[in-house]
């Protein structure tokens, strides 16, 4: 699904529009002209569907040089190893906080063990270890052809969570992962590294970003006036309340 000149949705599961495996998050393709990048990897159970979707838009998978991960939960990072095999030369970029969890396939640190207990993943599903080529830190900018993505720390939903900001063609894009959803909603989970106060501070840090295009990890996205979703969450917080839950 082409969203605009720069961004395509090439993967999405049951909490989205079901164009790849049902367990996948939204997987975005960024067109930087001479280079392409993927934002998040899904679980890896629908990699061929994702690559077919890339081809359907006239791109060759070999043009994809970067895979940015917003965080290490399996629906976002579990497919990194499979994509790396399918795309020779692919560089995996993820937060410095937690990079070793993916390298080691640490299902406990990535909360896959709890996800299985909760019935979100099949018991036989495993987190495949994957090298992380670039450990991103707050404020780091990575060029992707004609555009660039800036990583901003956004812990709370999980440790090592980051969001990505891109300025292109007069628009500001925010790839928010699971830090924030349409309507200013959030997702708190009963896992070891979900931290409400850190989550609220991460949202406060997005105030004034001036986001035009809001692209979360699940659910609806917004191609105009994206800042309103951040402002909605902050509005709840200003009334001493927690933003409503995505689920």
Image (tube, rainbow, N blue to C red):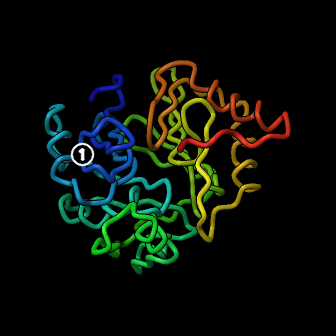
Establish if 207 lies above or below 49: above
Quadrant in which the N terminus appears: top left
Residue at image coords 29%, 71%: 125
Other-residue count near label 1 (Cα within 10 Å), few / some / many at <14 / 14–19 / ≥20: many
| Secondary-structure class at tag 1 | loop
Toward which corner of the image does residue 138 lie, by quadrant? Answer: bottom right
Q: Position of residue 195 (x, y in %)?
A: 69, 61
Q: Position of residue 124 (x, y in %)?
A: 27, 75
Establish if 219 lies above or below 86: above
Q: Work out whether residue 200 or residue 117 is closer to the camera in this orientation and state it.
A: 117
Toward which corner of the image does residue 98 lie, by quadrant? Answer: bottom right
Residue at image coords 33%, 44%: 14
What residue is disc 1 on?
20
- In the drawing, does residue 183 fall left or right of residue 102? right
Establish if 39 lies above or below 30: below
Q: Work out whether residue 44 or residue 87 is closer to the camera in this orientation and state it.
A: 44
Residue at image coords 50%, 40%: 175
- In the drawing, does residue 70 fall left or right of residue 40? right
Q: Position of residue 95 (x, y in %)?
A: 53, 62
Residue at image coords 18%, 60%: 86
Counting labels gives: 1
Q: Work out whether residue 213 or residue 198 is closer to the camera in this orientation and state it.
A: 198
Toward which corner of the image does residue 169 lie, by quadrant? Answer: top left
Q: Position of residue 62 (x, y in %)?
A: 18, 50
């Amino acid at each position: 699904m082409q969203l605009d000149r720069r961004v395509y949705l090439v993967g999405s599961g049951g909490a989205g529009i079901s164009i790849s495996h049902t367990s996948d998050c939204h997987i975005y393709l960024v067109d930087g002209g001479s280079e392409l990048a993927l934002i998040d990897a899904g679980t890896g159970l629908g990699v061929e569907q994702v690559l077919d979707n890339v081809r359907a838009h006239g791109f060759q998978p070999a043009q994809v040089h970067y895979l940015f991960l917003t965080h290490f939960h399996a629906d976002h990072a579990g497919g990194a190893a499979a994509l790396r095999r399918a795309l020779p030369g692919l560089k995996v970029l993820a937060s410095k906080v937690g990079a070793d969890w993916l390298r080691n396939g640490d299902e406990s640190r990535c909360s896959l063990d709890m996800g299985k207990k909760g019935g979100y993943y099949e018991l036989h599903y495993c987190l495949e270890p994957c090298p992380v080529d670039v450990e991103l830190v707050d404020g780091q900018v990575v060029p992707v052809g004609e555009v660039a993505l800036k990583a901003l720390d956004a812990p709370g939903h999980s440790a090592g969570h980051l969001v990505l900001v891109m300025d292109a063609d007069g628009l500001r894009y925010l790839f928010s992962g699971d830090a924030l959803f349409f309507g200013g909603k959030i997702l708190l989970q009963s896992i070891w590294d979900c931290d409400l106060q850190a989550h609220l501070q991460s949202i406060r840090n997005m105030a004034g970003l001036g986001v035009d295009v809001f692209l979360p990890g699940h659910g609806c996205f917004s191609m105009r006036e994206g800042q309103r979703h951040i402002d909605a969450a902050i509005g709840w917080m200003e009334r001493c309340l927690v933003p409503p839950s995505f689920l």
